[in-house]
Amino acid sequence: MTPVNVANIINMLATTFQIASITQTPITPFEIEVHNEIRDILQNLQDVRSSFEYDYVLDFADPSEPHGAQIVEYITPAEKEEEDSFEYEECIVDDKDGKVDLSYKRKAIEFWKSGKKARWTLTSVQNSFHKVKSLQQLYRWEASVEKGGTNADKFTFITQYVLQKFEEACDRKSIVHDMNLRLWALEAKKQVDLPEFKQMDVFFHHYT
């Protein structure tokens, strides 16, 4: 790998963004995250011991077909301990894929709680929302919706946000770099409460 002079890159960035003319403001947590991403990229470029170069792309077999998102959920140590101590009961699959999106859950819960004097019965809810299997499931969904969705819901939102930005860039025939993907992911992260999120947790998958 060709050695890189980081000072040259920083000086060019300072010139490009006319640093001297920008008014100083308090540093925000998001700006710290962006700084850390840029720092990591520059440090990787300085690592002249590396003899391999990797080219990562989002590869879709047929651009005309719809794309989906596949998520890999990061589990915190506390969640792992809770999972290990959990006594499993009968598994109820919400649908054929075992997944129900947050929007569907929210609509089902809103309908369930919309009764004038009390919540609608399970049968009434099931007539309009066929993926509902039990009252216990509705209570789980209610708790999930109140928290803004499960980690899987939030990962899916971030993945779909980045994918949308990527497709928009492709439509403009813009070149997309790894840094673009990271920044888009950070933008999406600001919209959901997911402190465990890391960019490497997000992968894109084309459904065939």
Image (cartoon, rainbow, N blue to C red):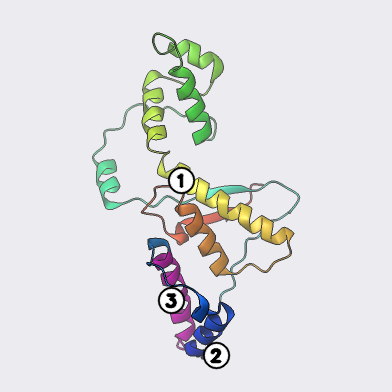
- Taking the magenta stretch, the answer to whether it contains residue 45 is yes
Q: Secondary structure at mark 2?
A: loop
Residue mark closest to the camera, 1 vs 3: 3
Q: In screen coordinates, is 195 left or right of 152?
A: left
63 relative to 130, above or below? below
Quadrant in the picture for residue 198: bottom left
Determine the residue positioned at 54% across, 20% down.
130
- Label 1: which residue? 154
- Label 2: which residue? 2
First along the sequence among labels 3 and 2: 2
Quadrant occupied by the N terminus: bottom right
User: Can residue 71 be seen?
Assistant: yes
The amino acid at mark 1 is Lys
The amino acid at mark 2 is Thr
First along the sequence among labels 1 and 3: 3
What is the C-alpha distance between the residues marked 1 and 3?
26 Å
What is the C-alpha distance between the residues marked 3 and 2?
18 Å
Q: Residues within 10 Å of mark 1 (few under 14, many from 20)?
A: many
In the rendered image, the residue lying farthest to the top is: 117
Determine the residue positioned at 36% across, 53% down.
195
Determine the residue positioned at 36% across, 54% down.
196
Q: Secondary structure at mark 3?
A: helix
Q: Which residues make up the magenta segment? A: 31-49
Frontmost residue, 95 versus 42: 42
Residue 179 percent coordinates (x, y) = 54, 69
User: Can residue 91 be seen?
Assistant: no
- Label 3: which residue? 39
Residue 41 percent coordinates (x, y) = 48, 76
- Taking the magenta stretch, the answer to whether it contains residue 139 is no
